[in-house]
Image (spheres, rainbow, N blue to C red):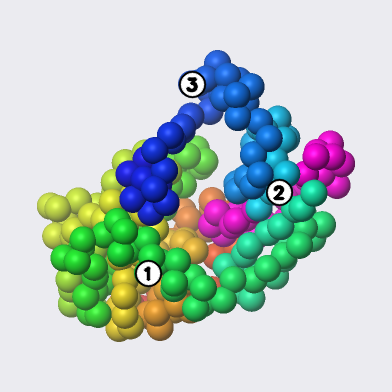
């Protein structure tokens, strides 16, 4: 995070905290830094996040989507939260997948802007030029597996999720040649594919879009926002993979189920269907 912020924006005084580990540091940070002109954040469904944003007393607040869960219908009294921030004169939301999912109810009190594919491509281009070496940019025939982190739900285990990712790459190999790349989910507790699986692992610190500069590639995932953004931004082919264990997660956690608007391309239980 510090490297990206420094390279992309020239920032030198960068602070990052983890919930539950640095509460004293967060309190001290609020005391010193309250009153920023613009604060950008997401995860408003988390009451701790809303409390931190309010404590920082921004004069403008900008929401940006953070994956498919941003589009779920979270039960938040957003108007009361806004009323508790009288010093904030503007609330805006910038959404990359509003065309697919619409504006979720909890953000309708904001000034909403739907980001165009060209704007998203320019952002990815700027970050790529600042942070990604030329040899790490993916070729037009690349196959990317986008990882999940559903073991955090305690509905499936890390071992089960690991096995499912191995089954997915094995099934893809029967259908399509490489080179193969794996992009772990940024909040995953472990990388579910590695060099011994004959895949190159991409760093988690940057979004997958910044490693791509042209069309022709293919992406697979059980669930990922990039299954929507990669076709929109670069014309990539994108396929959703289904498995009963993943569907069990979606049934138990509807906020994670937005991917179901995309029909599965194949079921791992019936590998011939690929």
Secondary structure beneath dot 1 equals: helix
Label 2 secondary element: strand
Dot label at residue 21:
3
Residue drawn where x is 39% and y is 48% of the image: 10
Range of magenta residues = 63-88
Residue name at image x 44 percent, y 72 percent: 122
Q: Would you call the spot at circle 3 few (<14 residues within 10 Å), some (14-19), or many (20 or more)? A: few
Q: Which quadrant of the figure contains the C terminus?
A: bottom left
Q: Nearer the viewer, mark 1 or mark 2?
A: 2
Q: Residue furthest top?
A: 24
Is the N terminus in the top left, top right, bottom left or bottom right quadrant? Answer: top left
- In the image, residue 262 sits, relative to residue 169, either above or below, namely below
Q: Are marks 3 and 1 in contact (CB under 8 Å)?
A: no
Q: Position of residue 183 (x, y in %)?
A: 32, 57
Q: CA distance from mark 2 to mark 3?
A: 28 Å
- Check residue 60 in the rendering and tell me which mark sits there, or answer none: 2
**Is residue 63 something one can see in this rendering?**
yes
Image quadrant where residue 129 sits: bottom left
Mark found first going from the N terminus, 3 or 1: 3
């Amino acid at each position: 995070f510090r490297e990206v912020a420094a390279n992309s924006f020239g920032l030198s005084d960068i602070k990052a905290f983890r919930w539950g580990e640095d509460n004293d540091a967060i309190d001290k940070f609020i005391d010193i830094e309250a009153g920023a002109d613009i604060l950008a954040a997401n995860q408003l469904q988390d009451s701790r996040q809303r409390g931190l944003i309010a404590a920082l007393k921004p004069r403008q607040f900008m929401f940006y989507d953070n994956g498919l869960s941003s589009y779920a219908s979270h039960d938040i009294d957003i108007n009361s939260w806004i009323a508790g921030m009288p010093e904030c004169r503007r609330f805006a939301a910038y959404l990359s997948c509003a065309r697919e999912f619409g504006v979720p109810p909890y953000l309708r009190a904001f000034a909403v802007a739907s980001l165009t594919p060209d704007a998203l491509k320019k952002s990815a281009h700027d970050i790529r030029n600042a942070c990604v070496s030329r040899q790490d940019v993916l070729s037009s025939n690349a196959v990317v597996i986008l990882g999940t982190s559903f073991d955090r739900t305690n509905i499936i285990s890390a071992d089960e999720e690991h096995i499912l990712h191995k089954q997915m790459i094995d099934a893809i190999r029967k259908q399509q040649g490489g080179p193969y790349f794996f992009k772990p989910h940024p909040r995953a507790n472990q990388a579910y594919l590695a060099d011994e699986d004959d895949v190159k692992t991409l760093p988690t610190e940057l979004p997958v879009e910044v490693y791509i500069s042209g069309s022709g590639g293919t992406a697979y995932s059980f669930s990922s926002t990039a299954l929507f953004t990669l076709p929109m931004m670069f014309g990539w082919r994108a396929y959703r993979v289904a498995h009963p264990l993943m569907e069990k997660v979606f049934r138990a956690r509807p906020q994670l189920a937005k991917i179901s608007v995309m029909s599965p391309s194949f079921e791992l239980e019936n590998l011939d269907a690929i």
